[in-house]
Image: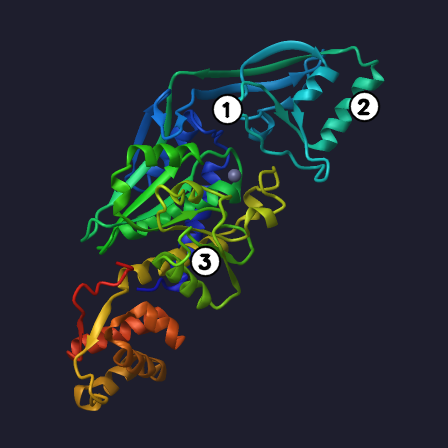
Amino acid sequence: MEAAPSYEKTVGEEMMRLAATLFPIFRSMTGEGVRETLRILKGHVPLTIQEVPTGTKVLDWEVPHEWNCRDAYIRDESGERLVDLRASNLHVVSYSVPVREKLPWREIEKHIFTLPDQPDRIPYRTAFFERTWGFCSSHDELERIRRRDRESGGEKRYEVCVDSTLEEGSLTYGELLLPGEEPEEVLFSTHICHPSLANDNLSGLAVATFLARHLGRRKNRYSYRFLFIPATIGSITWLARNRDGVTRVRHGMVLRLLGDRGEMTYKRSRRGDAMIDRAAAHVLRHSGTSSAIVDFRPTGGDERQFCSPGFDLPVGCLMRTPEERYPEYHTSADDLDRIGAGQLGDSWARCAEIVEVLEGDAVYLNQKPYGEPRLGTRGLYRAYGKLGNGEEIQHAVLWVLSQSDGKHSLLDIADRSGIRFAVIRKAADLLLKTELLREAEGGEGGGR
Ligand code: ZN
């Protein structure tokens, strides 16, 4: 089943609206922003919100204190806020410890982060496992404050306030399981911890949510599990709590950076030749536009945890422009203008197609393997006409018959023939109806 272009467009627009709703929420690794985000997602898909208490041992880590921040600013003597959390969620370093002090500018500056080579952008910074405080500002703004401070003699004191709490609480994540005919699972994971960044965070959240909604409305062969988790510590926490359950994961993808205008990029799992790696490569190759397949490396998103050697799950990562080629990454320029309904819809459609490959792959046996069977007497030529593009389906039928010796899956056949999986699948369905094909023993494909 392929999504019609008009449906893809509608979903793209819905995803864009969701991203716009989520954009202003002040998220961090833990805290109320994450809960509020998950509550909004719950309006779209029936996910369960999990709370894991501070201090819980998770693999080599520990669930951290919960962080919430009501306000943060640097104020001059006249009461003017020079840096103000209310102006941008990026202005305070995430996980800053509470502070309320009067300090000279030269002291404050040690706690300010800017991007000198992108002077009009505010960086996104975190201090998750340090006990410190800090602010982020555009470099231009920093220069302005510096100049004013110097002009007034440099002895002024400024009020620094981070009205935050860092205390016992919990790490919050969302989880959704859509049971299929089989207990084996396909895992989709996306992070939920970034404040007001659109491509790096909201795009993945939107695509995962609407993919879950799509799969939840139909019957599936596989069970589908969606994780909405804070990056790194979230996947570590989930893996720690599901050490036995992970053996059910047959395929998976981390979804991130899916809304920018760049081409699609698939990063392979650590295994490199897992079924998901082949399915994603197949779909991107046939997507009609340029795309890239890159090999696994132990940097990037939560695939680092899923693919750590002890787990070694077949989990790749689907994105558009990778972070190292995305100059807006982790800056205030990664705003809603960087993402678009068209790109979100396209990313969503590629995910849905990859799912179709996973769902539809199988190994069959040609029941008339000696010479070519007569197709006309079985009504196949008439059937081609009804399917449109008669020649392609005709070739696909010949390929399926030729390769179905119990050793080649439909994806193998699609790759070898250069024909799209969806067409090969249709050809197999036609042949199953005429009983020229039957499923091979243990031949469900899907890399099992
Ligand atoms: Zn990020």
Instruction: Please tell me which residue is depicted at 22% across the width and 56% down the height of the picture.
Output: 221
Q: Residues within 10 Å of mark 2 (few under 14, many from 20)?
A: few
Q: Which amino acid does label 3 sit on?
A: Asp
Taking the image as drawn, is residue 7 in sight?
yes
Local SS, label 2: helix
Give, as a three-letter code, the residue at label 2.
Arg
Q: Quadrant of residue 29?
A: top left
Q: Return the disc, 1 or 2, that comes first in the chain's sequence.
A: 1
Q: Dot 3: what SS? A: helix
Q: Is residue 105 visible?
A: no
Q: Is mark 1 within 8 Å of ligand 1?
A: no
Residue placed most toward the observer, 300 or 88: 300
Judged left or right of residue 231, residue 112 is right
- Toward the viewer: 120 or 81? 120
Provide residue 304's location: percent of width, then percent of height. 44, 42
Q: How far apart are marks 2 and 3 (CA)?
A: 47 Å
What residue is shown with label 1?
A: 129
Badge 1 element? loop
Q: Name the residue under label 2.
A: 147
Q: In which quarter of the image is the N terminus?
A: bottom left
From the viewer's side, name the closer residue of 160 and 424: 424
Tell me how far mark 1 sits from mark 3, CA to CA. 37 Å
Residue behind mark 3: 346
x and y percentages locating residue 198 in the rendered image: 52, 42
Query: Which is in the foreground here, disc 1 or disc 2?
Result: 1
The type of residue carrying mark 1 is: Phe
